[in-house]
Image (spheres, grey):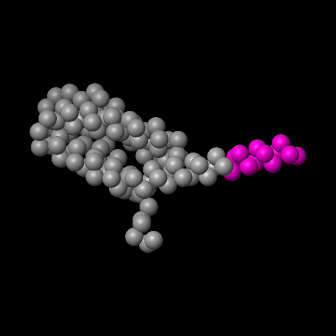
Amino acid sequence: MEARRAMTGQSDTMSKALQAVRDRFLFDLDQRICEFEDLKAQILAGSDPATAIRAAAMSAHKIRGVAATLGLAQLGDLAGAVEDQFTAATGTVAEFWQQAGPTYERFLDEMERVQPDYSTF
């Protein structure tokens, strides 16, 4: 019985810790959305698009792993799709964006969808 209480206590502690990480991740999404919007602008402006594409792929990679762990499967899947498409980028910027742009936009939309509305606090 004592062992069961200890396990339950550990489980509660772990759940609270995971919830705190999830809350922080969601809180930071606004900043991440801005970063991804800036990278999109750099790509489309043609000002060193290769660097912006690499940066977007690396940032998407980070979100891919964390989102899945935090129960945000759709966001994780879209981040993975962005990472994969951006890592395999070829052709002109216009050709690349024609293929990868729709996935990128869905990814941005999903980040906005899961982001809490802090205006009600």
In the image, is 50 to the left or to the right of 60?
left
11 magenta-colored:
yes
| Residue 78 colored in magenta in the image | no
Q: Quadrant of residue 86?
A: top left
**Residue at 49% across / 55% down in the picture?**
23
**91 left or right, relative to 87:** left
Residue at the extreme left of the image, as rendered: 46
Which residue is at the front of the view, 59 or 85?
59
- Residue 60 in sight from this viewpoint: yes
Determine which quarter of the picture holds residue 39. Answer: top left
Provide residue 60's location: percent of width, then percent of height: 35, 39
Observer-nearest of 28 and 36:
28
Quadrant of the frame with the C terminus: bottom left
- Main secondary-structure element of the magenta-colored stretch: helix
- What range is drawn magenta here? 1-12
Q: Is residue 96 visible?
A: no
Residue sitting at x 45%, y 50%: 25
Q: Residue at x 31, y 43 (%)?
A: 103
